[in-house]
C-alpha cells in the first residue's frame, strides 16, 4: 500500500463520522449527559487526529524515509484506537476499568505530536 497513513486517516474519519452520528442520534436518549460528553470527547479526538494522520501521510510523501514520521503515524493511529476507543466503550458499556487505558492513548497522541515537531524542527535546520 502506497500510503498506509492516508488510508488509516480516511478509515478513522469514516468511523468518526459514523460513531459521532450514532452518538448524537442513537445514544442521546440512552446515555447520561456525563457519559454522552465522554463519548463526544472520543469523537472529537478521533476526528482531529484522523486529520493529523492525513497530514502525516502528506508529509511522508515528501520525506518517504523519515522514521520520525513513520513512528508519529503509528502512534497517532494507536492513540485514536486507545484513547477514543476506550472512551466509546467506557461510555456505552460503563466499563470503568477502561479509564486506565485512556491515558495510554493520550500519551500516544503526545508522543506523535512531539515526533512531528522534531521532524519539523530538523527540516527547518536543513533549509
Image: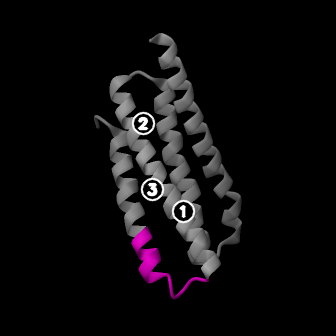
Crowd rating for badge 3 (residues with CA inside 10 Å; few <14, some 14–19, many 20+): many
Q: Are marks 1 and 2 in contact (CB under 8 Å)?
A: no
Residue 15, horizontal then vertical, whole percent: 39, 62
- For the residues labelled 3 and 1, the Cα–Cα distance comes to 9 Å
Q: Which mark is residue 47?
A: 3
**Distance CA(mark 3)–CA(mark 2):** 14 Å
Q: Secondary structure at mark 3?
A: helix
In the orientation shown, which residue stands out farthest toward the left?
A: 2
Point out which mark residue 42 bears: 1
Magenta residues span: 20-32
Q: How many marks?
A: 3
Q: Residue at x 59, y 72 (%)?
A: 37
Q: Earlier in the sequence, mark 3 or mark 2?
A: 3
Residue 94 at x, y = what percent?
64, 76
Image coordinates of residue 81 in percent, x first then y, are: 52, 54
Calculate the distance from the C-alpha at mark 1 to the C-alpha at mark 2: 21 Å
Of residues 70 and 50, the one drawn nearer to the viewer in this rendering: 50
CB under 8 Å between discs 3 and 1: no
Observer-nearest of 125 and 92: 125
Classify 89 as above or below 8: below
* Residue 67 colored in magenta in the image: no
Please report whichever mark, 3 or 1, sits nearer to the chain's N-terminal start.
1
Find residue 56 and name its label: 2
Residue 89 seen? no
Which image quarter holds the C terminus?
Answer: top left
Q: Are marks 3 and 2 in contact (CB under 8 Å)?
A: no
Amino acid at each position: 500500500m502506497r500510503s498506509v497513513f492516508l488510508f488509516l486517516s480516511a478509515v478513522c474519519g469514516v468511523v468518526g463520522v459514523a460513531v459521532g452520528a450514532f452518538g448524537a442520534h442513537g445514544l442521546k436518549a440512552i446515555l447520561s449527559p456525563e457519559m454522552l460528553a465522554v463519548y463526544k470527547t472520543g469523537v472529537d479526538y478521533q476526528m482531529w487526529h484522523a486529520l493529523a494522520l492525513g497530514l502525516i501521510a502528506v508529509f511522508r510523501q515528501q520525506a518517504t524515509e523519515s522514521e520520525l514520521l513513520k513512528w508519529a503515524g503509528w502512534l497517532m493511529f494507536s492513540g485514536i484506537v486507545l484513547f477514543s476507543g476506550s472512551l466509546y466503550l467506557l461510555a456505552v458499556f460503563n466499563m470503568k476499568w477502561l479509564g486506565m487505558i485512556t491515558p495510554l492513548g493520550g500519551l500516544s497522541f503526545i508522543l506523535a505530536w512531539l515526533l512531528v515537531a522534531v521532524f519539523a524542527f530538523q527540516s527547518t535546520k536543513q533549509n
